[in-house]
Each structure stands twice: as structure tokens, then as C-alpha cells.
Image: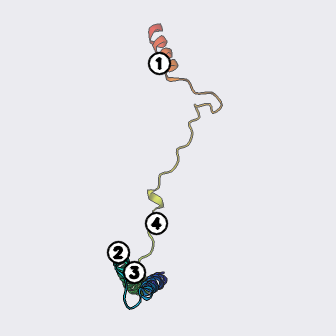
């Protein structure tokens, strides 16, 4: 990815170099003031420097990415050895925790499964009526 960017920036710099060479060739040995001003004002040299800097940055980024990839691969290679070492040292067996698990309650026989549940307000009213009757 970065290598491709470096190549592209170099090609762009070459294009601008050819444009600058064409302007200088057109001007010849004794350029007029207009031609000299055009070469100075076109800022092609600044653009070429920009592309050179970007090409160098891309090259450095490619080197850094390669180093990071190598470090990641090295770390990935170390992880399995760490895991196997830690697993080999532990001879402990799994504990039986079934006694700690709560069991489901059995349904009360007094509840009728098919009967719909009463609303809370109805239950309160029924209890209130029972207390009055006593």
C-alpha cells in the first residue's frame, strides 16, 4: 500500500519535472522576461518538492508498517507457547459445583393452573369484605 503510494508520488514528481523542462526548453538560451516570470510563478519546483516529501513519507511508513507486522507476528508466535506453559503447570481438576445451584420450586397444589390470576385490587377488596363480616 505505502510502496504503491511512493511509486505514484515519484511518477507525479516526474511529470512536473517534465513540465518544468519543457518550459525551460521553450524559453531557450535567452528567455524573455515573460518566460522567466512564468517559470518562477508556476511554482512547479515547490510542487515537485511536495511530491518528493510525500514519497519519502510513504517509504518511511512502509518500513514502519513492516516492522509493526513483524512485531505482531512475533507476539502471536509467543502467545501459544505462553498458553501451553500455563496449562501444563495447572494440574487442578474442575470443581463440582452442582450443590451450589438452586433447584426449581415445585408448584403448589393449591393453585389451579387453569384459573386466571386475580388483579391485586380485587384481592384487597375480597379481604376487606371478609374482615367486615366477622
Nearest the viewer among 69 and 8 is 8
Secondary structure of residue under mark 2: helix
Nearest the viewer among 89 and 58 is 58
Instruction: In the rendered structure, find residue 10 and report the number of the disc placed on it.
Output: none
Nearest the viewer among 12 and 67 is 12
Which residue position holds label 4?
96
Which residue position holds label 1?
124
Sequence-wise, the earlier of marks 4 and 1 is: 4
Sequence-wise, the earlier of marks 2 and 4 is: 2
Q: Position of residue 75 (x, y in %)?
A: 40, 84
Image point 48% across, 11% down: which residue?
129
Which residue position holds label 3?
51
- Between circles 3 and 2, the one closer to the viewer is 2
Image point 41% across, 89% down: which residue?
28
* Dots 4, 1 in contact, CB < 8 A: no
**Label 4 to label 3, Cα distance in Å?**
68 Å
Amino acid at each position: 500500500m505505502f510502496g504503491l503510494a511512493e511509486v505514484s508520488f515519484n511518477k507525479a514528481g516526474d511529470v512536473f519535472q517534465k513540465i518544468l523542462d519543457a518550459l525551460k526548453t521553450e524559453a531557450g538560451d535567452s528567455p524573455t522576461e515573460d518566460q522567466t516570470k512564468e517559470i518562477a510563478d508556476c511554482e512547479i519546483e515547490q510542487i515537485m518538492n511536495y511530491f518528493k516529501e510525500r514519497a519519502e513519507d510513504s517509504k518511511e511508513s512502509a518500513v514502519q508498517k513492516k516492522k509493526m507486522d513483524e512485531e505482531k507476528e512475533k507476539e502471536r508466535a509467543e502467545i501459544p507457547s505462553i498458553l501451553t506453559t500455563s496449562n501444563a503447570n495447572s494440574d487442578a481438576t474442575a470443581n463440582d459445583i452442582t450443590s451450589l445451584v438452586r433447584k426449581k420450586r415445585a408448584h403448589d397444589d393449591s393453585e389451579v393452573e387453569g384459573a386466571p390470576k386475580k388483579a391485586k385490587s380485587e384481592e384487597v377488596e375480597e379481604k376487606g369484605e371478609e374482615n367486615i363480616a366477622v
